[in-house]
Image (tube, rainbow, N blue to C red):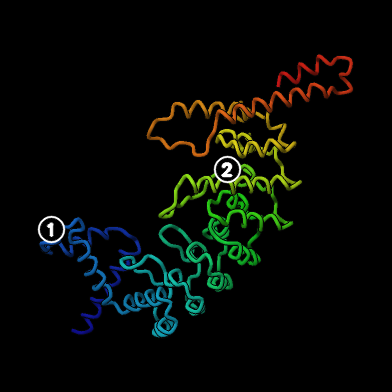
């Protein structure tokens, strides 16, 4: 009789595990089990209804399985950074890869902030160092994102032989959100490169935090850095200046002030890039657009002013994109679109279209006047031909 009961219990756990793994019919299965449950007076008026009570009952029921109970304890101990507790639970054969969706959807290794706990978990022979969460983020990517200053913790997982260091693009996460110390630690790994296809410099110039200038400065110090690396859409880092990554407004901060500070840092970054003699200012993306096209369309007077001071930028004035637009045309089109913007649509922050258009028109006329005087030797007898060619630009 006892053996029969144990067998039935194992079958129940197996059925639950199969349903949890597949995700099919989980809601229907739970509702059937509790269909006769009577709500309390509070649950009748609560928005959550009987949900919290049913969840607690499901957790208690599943923890009747010793394996689940140990796994949940291990997850909690890892989150609490309790080294001794983690060590004890692993000695009791707790699963280092345990995931209990009713409690937490992360494996224990992804929850800890302790290098010592991480070392214990990583030493386990069954550890899956490349496990991903429901958002397809790897453990390493989560560590880089959530523990930006904890270089020692990240170093522990980087040393694991089975680690897929490219899964989840942790190097891109570090370039977007991490300090230089985190980037330095990741780039010490033999399989990671400063010229990663994601474009570390592309990510750094789009940062909106105060560390953006420091990270860009550190990247530019490396001789092996390809400053003209092409990333998504054939864009270079120069084309990304003026773009925005995620922006967080803290309590007590004024959005207008923060955006102005970001713009000031972007001007500084642009000047740093233009100081490089190997920078291709006239590079075009997959839409045949230059950096001047993008900055003009964004109405960024501050950036356009800096860019036009560089003599290498002159040919960009007459470069046409896939739609046949020059930077001036792109600015005019963006300005017209802004005039017809609906009240509920997000305005283009920091945009000054009229001033950008005026600046581009004046610059174009100035450069045409200069070019007219530079008659090629072959056309010295026919200067009018050269003037006609210049004016047709």
Left or right: residue 364 compared with residue 264 = right
Q: Is residue 356 above or below residue 127?
A: above
Q: Which comes before the other along the chain, label 1 or label 2?
A: 1
Left or right: residue 109 compared with residue 261 = left
Q: Residue at x 55, y 68 (%)?
A: 163
Q: Quadrant of residue 48?
A: bottom left
Q: Quadrant of the N terminus?
A: bottom left
Q: Please name the residue that numbered disc 2 is placed on.
A: 242
The image shows residue 238 at horizontal and vertical percentages of 64, 44
The image shows residue 197 at horizontal and vertical percentages of 62, 52
Calculate the distance from the C-alpha at mark 1 to the C-alpha at mark 2: 52 Å
Foreground residue, 313 or 201?
A: 313
Crowd around label 2: few <14 · some 14–19 · many ≥20 (10 Å): many
Q: Residue at x 57, y 64 (%)?
A: 165
Q: Quadrant of the C terminus?
A: top right
Q: Secondary structure at mark 1?
A: helix
Residue 270 has which mark?
A: none
Q: Residue at x 56, y 65 (%)?
A: 164
Q: Quadrant of residue 36?
A: bottom left
Q: Is residue 155 above or below residue 285?
A: below
The image shows residue 364 at horizontal and vertical percentages of 69, 26
């Amino acid at each position: 009789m006892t053996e029969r009961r144990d067998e039935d219990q194992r079958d129940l756990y197996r059925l639950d595990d199969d349903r949890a793994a597949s995700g099919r019919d989980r809601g229907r299965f739970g509702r059937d089990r509790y269909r006769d449950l009577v709500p309390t007076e509070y649950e009748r008026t609560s928005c959550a209804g009987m949900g919290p009570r049913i969840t607690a009952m499901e957790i208690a029921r599943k923890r009747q399985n010793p394996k689940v109970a140990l796994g949940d304890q291990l997850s909690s101990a890892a989150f609490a950074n309790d080294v001794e507790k983690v060590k004890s639970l692993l000695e009791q054969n707790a699963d280092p890869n345990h995931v209990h969706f009713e409690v937490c959807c992360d494996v224990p290794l992804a929850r800890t902030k302790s290098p010592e706990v991480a070392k214990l978990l990583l030493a386990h022979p069954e550890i899956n160092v490349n496990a991903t969460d429901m958002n397809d983020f790897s453990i390493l990517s989560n560590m880089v994102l959530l523990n930006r200053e904890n270089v020692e913790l990240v170093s522990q997982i980087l040393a694991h032989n089975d680690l897929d260091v490219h899964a989840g693009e942790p190097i891109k996460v570090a370039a977007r959100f991490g300090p230089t110390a985190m980037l330095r630690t990741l780039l010490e790994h033999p399989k990671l490169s400063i010229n990663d296809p994601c474009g570390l410099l592309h990510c750094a110039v789009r940062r909106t935090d105060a560390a953006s200038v420091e990270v860009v400065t550190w990247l530019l110090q490396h001789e092996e850095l390809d400053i003209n690396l092409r990333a998504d859409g054939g864009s270079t880092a120069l084309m990304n200046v003026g773009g925005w990554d995620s922006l967080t407004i803290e309590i007590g901060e004024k959005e207008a002030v923060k955006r102005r500070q970001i713009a000031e840092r972007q001007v500084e970054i642009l000047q740093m890039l233009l100081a490089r003699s190997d920078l291709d200012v006239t590079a075009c993306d997959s839409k045949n657009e230059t950096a001047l096209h993008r900055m003009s369309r964004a109405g960024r007077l501050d950036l356009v002013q800096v860019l036009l001071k560089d003599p290498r930028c002159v040919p960009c004035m007459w470069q046409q994109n896939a739609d046949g637009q020059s930077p001036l045309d792109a600015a005019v089109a963006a300005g017209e679109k802004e005039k017809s913007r609906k009240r509920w649509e997000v305005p283009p922050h920091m945009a000054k279209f009229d001033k950008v258009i005026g600046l581009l028109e004046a610059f174009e006329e100035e450069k045409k006047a200069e070019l007219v005087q530079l008659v090629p030797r072959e056309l010295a007898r026919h200067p009018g031909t050269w003037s006609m060619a210049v004016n047709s630009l």
